[in-house]
Amino acid sequence: MPIATYMKRNPVQAIEQGVTTVYAKLTVGSTGTVTAATGYGLSGIARNATGNYTITLDRKFKKLLAVVPTVIQATPQGLKMTLEADAIASAGTITLEWNTDAGTATELSSGTVVLFAITVGDTSLTGGV
């Protein structure tokens, strides 16, 4: 379903203008492969390298406001997510990487599910973030 058809369903009260949240789900297989990527407004999720993924939305937005991951794992790995690139305005993509506390890129274990809340702004008004 294209984003334009459902953007108006959930109005958000915020000082920021044109706020939309896209919810996505990533399921990881062996060696960090993407076995499933779902979500309205999501075009896809691709693995680029060890622990590194690009999330592509189905259109561009003016700015990225937040990316919040929720990780579901049978055995927690103690990883942190780092946003590597924000190309939401030019390509509708963000690139992120999973790292250890030492900063080493690390693969998500097989069977890991990551739920993302990706909040974007869609206004050219000045101010805000």
Image (cartoon, rainbow, N blue to C red):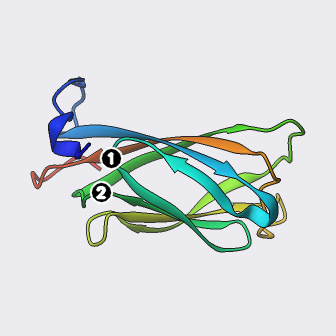
The quarter of the displayed image where residue 34 is located: bottom right
Q: Is residue 106 visible?
A: no
Residue ID for mark 1? 41
| 34 relative to 68 in the view: left or right | right
Residue at left offset 20%, top offset 24%: 9
The quarter of the displayed image where residue 75 is located: top right
| 19 relative to 85 in the view: left or right | left
Quadrant for the N terminus in the image: top left
Residue ID for mark 2? 58
| 75 relative to 85 in the view: left or right | right
In this rendered view, identify the residue nearer to me: 103 or 3.
Answer: 3
Where residue 6 sits: x, y (%)?
21, 33
In this rendering, the answer to whether 86 lies above or below 101 is below
The tag on residue 129 is none
In this rendered view, identify the residue nearer to me: 88 or 30.
Answer: 30
Where residue 127 sits: x, y (%)?
18, 50
In this rendering, the answer to whether 41 lies above or below 23 is below
Disc 2 element: loop
In this rendered view, identify the residue nearer to me: 111 or 119.
Answer: 111
The amino acid beneath tag 1 is Gly
State the separation of the CA atoms marked 2 and 1: 5 Å
The amino acid beneath tag 2 is Asp
